Amino acid sequence: MNEKKTMLSGIKPSGDLTLGSYLGPLHHWPKMIEEYDCYFFMADLHAITVRQDPAALRRRTLEQLAQYIACGLDPDKCTLFIQSHVRQHAELGWVLNCYAMFGELSRMTQFKDKSAKNADNINGGLFTYPSLMAADILLYQPDFVPVGEDQKQHVELTRNIVQRFNGVYGDVFKVPEPYIPKVGARIMSLTNPAAKMSKSETEDTGRVTLMDDPGAIMKQFKRAITDSDTERCVRYDPDNKPGVANLMTIYSTVTGKTYAEIEQEFDGQGYGKFKPAVGEAVVEILRPIREETQRLLSDKSYLEGVYRAGADKASHAAEKTLRKVYKKIGFVAR
Ligand code: ATP
Ligand code: LTN
């Protein structure tokens, strides 16, 4: 009997993965594959809610798969797949659209943000994005959904959909819990600590990608915004020194040191020592990931084998849920 709990998460291949993608969700995932039955995917259906260049989307989807593996997601121990390969996502997404309310979809912060930023392309997919995300989740009946802070609202909407759906049809879906890591839940842009470091929106100077070489990473950290007060000391004070706090969060997540230890380490040294030290720690954590990703990308047939096997496994699990849903809502079985 399989008593393992189930976990699922995904990232859109809408830009090159950043240090935020790594320290937020990705680096927590490898620990989970030993303990849980895990599904991780490239959310390409979600990526097209914003216009994508086809060649870039294809490249980033495969690169993201290689990065998942390079970060420690062993394909023999978890299920890695490309969302569009498992057609049940689109199918259940449609059904759940009919159980998600216009009012609640209108309240989603991500929809408001993305609409403001893509005023010439506020398409239906951008609006109904959370129903597709609910389908991603519910197809696999996971206990937990590890996501960053910004996705909590979508997981909560998923829980509302479950309650509404189960209220009518009985216990069809398990109610999923969001799982949000405390440290690293929100890594900010290096040049604008008020904005999340995002893979598609942060300007190049404010982010570090997983494929950046050491020179590029060091350059970004050296020019990172700290603060303009006269104190110029390394102290954790997110309200008054958000840039320093962000660098401390990065350093703490990468090295495992507490904020107090970091304050002590750089006591009396100003930012001249601190910024390159954070850069060096990041270089060392990203180096093996970049090298392994490059190696995997040169082995296309291996990657193909991984995503095909992953899609088969995921479809099998997803089909079980979809069949149950179709039956409950009254569709005629084929
Ligand atoms: P986009 O720029 O295309 O909107 P994004 O960079 O914001 O994308 P997502 O694909 O929306 O990234 O996020 C994938 C996962 O990574 C989500 O769980 C999200 O919360 C998390 N995440 C993204 N950026 C960060 C960040 N800077 N800090 C912590 N977690 C993050
Ligand atoms: N919406 C998420 C990506 C995503 C996801 C999911 C995360 C799509 N489907 C299912 C967890 C579970 C984002 O923008 N980060």
Image (cartoon, rainbow, N blue to C red):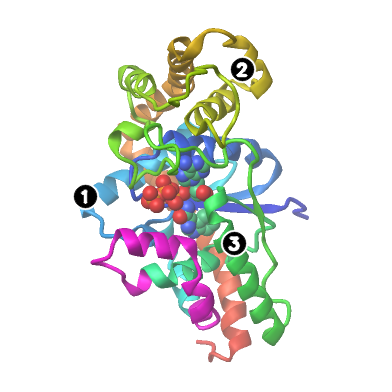
On residue 157, the disc is none
172 relative to 242 in the view: left or right: right
Residue type, numbered disc 3:
Val
Q: Is mark 3 within 8 Å of ligand 2?
A: yes
256 drawn magenta: no
- x, y percentage for residue 55? 21, 49
Residue under the image location 28 percent in, 49 percent down? 58
Disc 1 is placed on an element classified as helix
Q: Nearer the viewer, mark 1 or mark 3?
A: 3
Q: Residues within 10 Å of mark 1 (few under 14, many from 20)?
A: few
**Residue topped by disc 3:** 155
- x, y percentage for residue 49? 34, 63
Q: Nearer the viewer, mark 2 or mark 3?
A: 2
Q: Quadrant of residue 233?
A: top right
Q: Residues within 10 Å of mark 3 (few under 14, many from 20)?
A: many
**Front position in the image: 328 or 169:** 169
**Residue topped by disc 1:** 55
Main secondary structure along the magenta-highlighted residues: helix
**Residue topped by disc 2:** 262
Distance CA(mark 1)–CA(mark 3) = 31 Å
- x, y percentage for residue 106? 47, 73
Q: Is residue 224 visible?
A: yes
- The magenta segment is 96-125
- x, y percentage for residue 286? 44, 24
Residue under the image location 54 percent in, 67 percent down? 134
Distance CA(mark 2)–CA(mark 1) = 43 Å
